[in-house]
Amino acid sequence: MSRRNLNDADFSLMSKVAVLSAFSRDEIVSMTNGAAVVIYNGRELLFSEGEPAEQFFIVIKGQVRLFRILGDGRVALFHLVSAGESFAEAVVLSGQKYPVSAECDPGSQIIAISRLQLVNRLRNDKAMIGRMMQSLIERERFFYRELNDLRQRSPSQRLAGFLLSQSEDAEIVPKHVIANRIGVTPETFSRALRKLEDDGFIARDTRMSILDVEGLRQFSRR
């Protein structure tokens, strides 16, 4: 694990994150004063379910898995957080405990912002509270649209959407993780994958490389 100072690219990315999108650059600089980008060399646990929520996080590079360990020992994936996204801000603002655990991939670069720092900043500028609430509402709307999308689209269309969202240099995501992410069983995932391969949209390789980007995009929107 190592650290580096925030740079212009980091601030540019943070300004697009939902929870901070309503703030000016100067306000974001003030809010993140003293924070650093932490670079994780290996797969590491950021926090465990049930711990006090003292920080929220912004992913600069890499990916974070939010998960729960069920009573029978099975791991249930809740969400995959990619670069340019934040997580745990709502629970931090509410002063509750983390409802899930978070584990980052090797090579991930992540900024942690403390609850105390955030709350103190909001107390000093009441106008920021309204703007942050609006940002959180917009994010809730996004998740509602995503949930509604899952209900309306077929498993093959969900898989197509997931593949389109991944950058070419992203780490290969295990198939069982993708199945959890798009809300299908392993058997249904296999059928969805076979359809996309048979239709010529993707290749039969470990990365599920896209052969027809525009065709896959149109298929995902039908």
Image (cartoon, grey):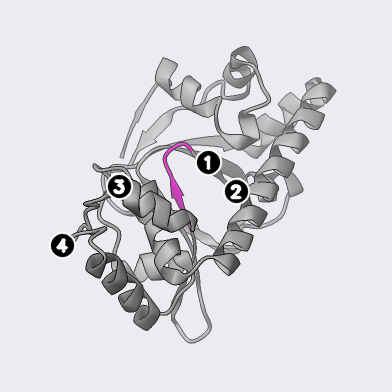
Looking at the image, the residue that sits furthest to the top is 26
Report the residue marked by disc 2.
88
- Please give left or right for residue 57 compared with residue 177 in the image: right
Looking at the image, the residue that sits furthest to the left is 205
Whole-Å distance between the Cαs marked 1 and 4?
A: 33 Å
Report the residue marked by disc 1.
57
- Dot 3 amino acid type: Val
Q: Which is more N-terminal, label 2 or label 3?
A: 2
Q: In front here: 120 or 65?
A: 65
Q: Nearer the viewer, mark 3 or mark 2?
A: 3
Q: Which is more N-terminal, label 3 or label 4?
A: 4
**Residue drawn where x is 46% and y is 65% of the image:** 182
Q: Which is more N-terminal, label 2 or label 4?
A: 2
**Residue drawn where x is 43% and y is 63% of the image:** 157
Whole-Å distance between the Cαs marked 3 and 1?
A: 32 Å
Task: Tell me the tag on residue 205.
Answer: 4
Task: Tell me the tag on residue 81.
Answer: none
**Residue drawn where x is 35% and y is 83% of the image:** 187
- Please give left or right for residue 67 compared with residue 196 in the image: right
Dot 3 and dot 1 residues touching (CB under 8 Å): no
SS label for mark 1: strand
Whole-Å distance between the Cαs marked 3 and 2?
A: 33 Å
Q: Position of residue 72 (x, y in %)?
A: 48, 87
